[in-house]
Amino acid sequence: MARQASSWILLLVLMNTPVGNGQSVEMDPEISGFVGSTVELSCRFLNSKNPVKISQVTWQKFFNGTKQNVAIANPALGVSLLPAFKDRVTFKHLSMSQTDSSLEDTTIVLSNLRLSDEAAYICEYTTFPAGNRENMVNLTVYARPTTHMTLTTPIIIARAQKHKMTVATCLSANGKPPSVIKWDTKLKGQATFQETRNPNGTVTIRSNYEIVPSRESHRQKLTCIVTYNSEHFSDSVILNVQYEPEVKIEGFDGNWYLDRQDVKLTCEADANPAVTGYHWKLSNGSLPKNVEIRNNTLLFKGPVTYDFSGTYICDATNSIGTRSGLVEVNVTEFPNHVIHRVDNGQEQPISSAAIWGGVVSGVVVLIIGVVLLIYFLRRRQRTFKGDYSTKKHVYGNGYSKAGSVPAHPTVPKNLQYPDDSDDEKKATQISGPGAFEGTERDFDGNSEDLKRPYFTVDEGESHDYDERTLAFQYEPESEIADDMVSQTDGSVISKKEWYV
């Protein structure tokens, strides 16, 4: 087969190569069409030099190594069509009864295309004296597939056993070339594909979509997309999944207290198909006497009593099965204070516990803020704001740090003082340079010396002081260590203790 195909490719090349004298047959190398459509197979005789007499033109179908006549055009006899193509083939520029016409353009029109028409078509010119000239065109026939999507079963039932099942099938039948199928859905599932090649050359693609049926898959959209060449076809279905009721009981707000009025319980059930019956019961006994059953609702008549306490069960039944819901009802002596707020047009309960919780939280935050404020204020007060200068002050006969107060010895209680002698009661005499011996000097409260109880001496400065100013000389006390901090009471502590 490979050798035969190579031979025909070589033959096609040779037929499309003009001969030395310039006569040739011009045709399209390839043409295609879809089943049912119409195509034109062009054929023109080119004579660039001396006129050549055309005796006949023959169209042939070449398939699987066999030639089959399709149509013949003769300048004297006119047009002749073979029975297999008589109803579907015509010459574009020639009529059946036309004679003595030019045969330079013998294009044929093939209508109602069939898959069996796919083959190579040869246009052969018989001429004199140049001989025969021919060329060939390959005709490819495509087939659009038939696509459709179906539900495997009109009713899909969600069972307690979780098993996959095929819910839909997408089919692309008798297509040439084959199609590509894809699924578009929010459902969690798996797609399977099967390809079948038909005897006429077409291909059928089948794809199944499998899911585990559930309540969530009900009313979900499932779309099949078929891509054929550059064309797209799609089809969709909405799943109808039947399932047992999903039951919940509403009405108990956690605030059923003695003497409360107008309370009720409602059995809400989501089911497909719809619930056909409800059944109420109390797990630890029979229903209270003053309870009325109205379909899916329990109406409690009269004030609430302790008899209303218990576990209430509601059974909901449809054609698929029965499911139950329950609620534990507790009755209290006093109500939980409830304040209602409007939210989206509906009243929503707010329990007093929630309110007190908010109040307590606010108080805790306030206390923490006050504690932090006191802490930082105390720390600020403890922060040293004095001057770390090296100046010292002289008190009497000694030195001390600036801002410090000299310590005084403790004075004993009941201290007895002796009577002053006459000599001690005399006026004080002040001796010094320039004073006269034996003379009394009046006390002068405005004396310059007395006005200066202390004076400062800068460290590092050298001064001479007279005897009148300093009676005694003391060594200045040692500097406070770098890691010590002076306090207002005259004491010193380490910086480590200061910042704790």
Image (cartoon, helix red, strand yellow):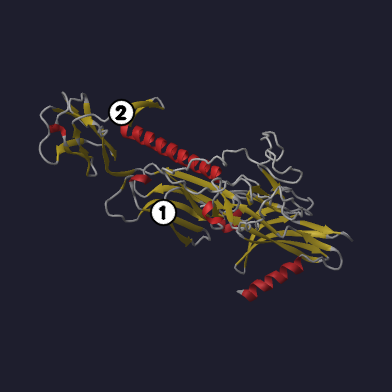
Q: Is residue 384 above or below residue 62?
A: above
Are circles 1 and 2 on residues that touch, CB within 8 Å? no
Q: Position of residue 406 (x, y in %)?
A: 57, 48
Q: Type of residue at label 1? A: Gly
Dot 2: element: strand
Residue projecting furthest to the right:
50
Judging depth in this view, the residue of 400 and 273 nearest the camera is: 400
Pick whichever, 247 or 462, lies toward us. 462
**Nearest-to-viewer mark from 1 and 2:** 2
Residue 127: x and y in percent read 79, 62
Residue 500 pos. (x, y %): 51, 52
Residue 144 visible in the snapshot = no
Q: What residue is shown with label 2?
A: 338
In the image as oriented, which residue stretches furthest toward the bottom? Answer: 3
Q: Residue at x 74, y 43 (%)?
A: 435
* Residue at the spot 61% in from the left edge and 48% down from the top edge: 37
Disc 2 marks a residue whose amino acid type is Val
Query: From the image, which quarter does the N terminus lie in?
Result: bottom right
How far apart are the alpha carbons under marks 1 and 2? 48 Å
Report whether 490 appears left or right of 160.
right
- Answer above or below: position of 82 versus 383: below
Task: State the residue in front, 132 or 310.
Answer: 310
Q: Which residue is mark 1?
A: 189
Is residue 330 visible in this depiction of the protein?
yes
